[in-house]
Each structure stands twice: as C-alpha cells, then as structure tokens.
Image (spheres, rainbow, N blue to C red):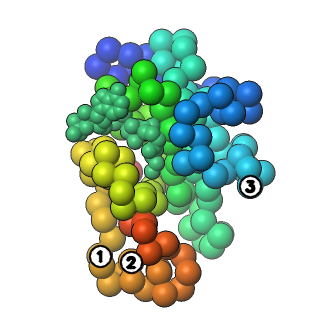
Amino acid sequence: MMFSDRFAITLSDFNQEFFDSLDDNYQIKGPALGQEQYFHTILVDGLRAGVVGYLPPRNVLLDDAGFVQIVLAPEFRGRGLIGPIYELLAERHGLKTLYGTVTKKNTLSLRAHEKIGFRLLSEEKMADLRRRGLLGEDEVRLEKEIS
Ligand SMILES: CC(C)(COP(=O)(O)OP(=O)(O)OC[C@H]1O[C@@H](n2cnc3c(N)ncnc32)[C@H](O)[C@@H]1OP(=O)(O)O)[C@@H](O)C(=O)NCCC(=O)NCCS
C-alpha cells in the first residue's frame, strides 16, 4: 500500500470484467496479448479506480525495464494518482526503468507523465525507433529512471 496526499492506493490482481467496463481501455494492450500477469486493478481507498501494468521488453537483458500502460476511471483522473501508482508498480515488479509510449495528440497524458519526471527521448532516438518500426509516426516515447 502507498499513501498519496489523501488516498490509500493498492494494486490488486487484474480483473477482466472490470477492465472491460473501463472507459478508454483501448489505451492498454497487455491483457489482449496474454500478458495479464503484469497488469493490476488499482484500488484507491478500496474502490476500483483503474488498471495499470507493463509489457516487458523483448530483449531479456532489460529485465528491469517495462513499457507502462495506465487507464484511470474518469472520476479518478486529475488527482495526481499516476505518480504513486507507477511507484507501486515499479516496486512490485522490481522495475528500474519505465518507458511510456503516448500518442502525440494525448497532450494531457504527455503532461501528466512529464510532471512526474518522465523525459522525452531525443528526436534522433525517436527517429531511429520509427525507422525500425518500433514507434508510430503519431507517437512519442518517454523514459523515467526509478531511483
Ligand atoms: C493520463 C492519466 C493516466 C493521467 O493520470 P492522472 O493521475 O489523472 O494525472 P494528473 O492528476 O497529473 O492529471 C493530468 C491532467 O488531467 C487534468 N484533469 C483534471 N481533472 C480531470 C478529469 N476529471 N478528467 C480528466 N483530466 C482531468 C488535470 O488538470 C491535469 O492537467 P494539468 O497537469 O494541466 O493540471 C489519466 O488521465 C487517464 O487515465 N487518462 C485516460 C487514459 C490515458 O490516456 N492513459 C494514458 C495512455 S498513454
């Protein structure tokens, strides 16, 4: 459990039914790829507040890195929950580097990630990823090291 300013946050097991009922759940691709074990239902003061998880990189040498994905239920957005939720996720799975892939037009998510210390990769690195088919033309990649 972790406490943000006002909320007690826990990560429980992934629940497909709750995930299916969540607005904007298309932002989370892991469960459809059979990676449910890396995903959780977020509980805030005991209420189901969203889903968070990550996809492990294909390169097994990067076993402490993850491509994070999060969707909060609308009534839990805008309360600064994203930071403590990612901290819990990193702690639970021993992640040291978090990567985020955000659609350029999702400026709200971009700002939310930058506010908690995610940094955009350089244009050069992103161009290289796009050339290799690892990042969409309409997406950006962010990175955060966990201290
Ligand atoms: C992106 C998301 C995870 C951010 O988490 P969060 O805990 O809401 O982040 P923050 O509390 O920092 O709020 C982010 C912004 O939302 C704004 N906001 C406030 N109330 C809101 C509400 N009811 N609904 C949506 N956004 C709201 C905040 O003002 C803030 O903008 P600001 O930084 O300019 O003030 C969350 O908004 C979400 O689940 N969005 C839908 C799914 C999605 O886009 N996921 C990310 C895919 S990359």
Locate residue 144, reporting x and y percent.
36, 56
Is 28 located above or below residue 129 in the figure? above
Residue type, numbered disc 3? Leu
Q: Nearer the viewer, residue 3 or 132?
A: 132
Residue type, numbered disc 1? Ser
Locate residue 34, reporting x and y percent.
78, 51
Is 104 located above or below residue 92 in the figure? below
* Residue at image location 56% in from the left, 67% down from the top: 62
* Count of number-bearing discs: 3
Is the residue at mark 3 in contact range of ligand 1, meaning its CB lies under 8 Å from it? no
Q: Going by the image, does 7 lie left or right of 72?
A: left
Q: Residues within 10 Å of mark 2 (few under 14, many from 20)?
A: many
Residue corresponding to mark 2? 126
Is the residue at mark 2 in contact range of ligand 1, meaning its CB lies under 8 Å from it? no
Residue corresponding to mark 1? 122
Q: Residues within 10 Å of mark 3 (few under 14, many from 20)?
A: few
Residue type, numbered disc 2? Met
Residue corresponding to mark 3? 33
Q: Residue furthest right?
A: 34
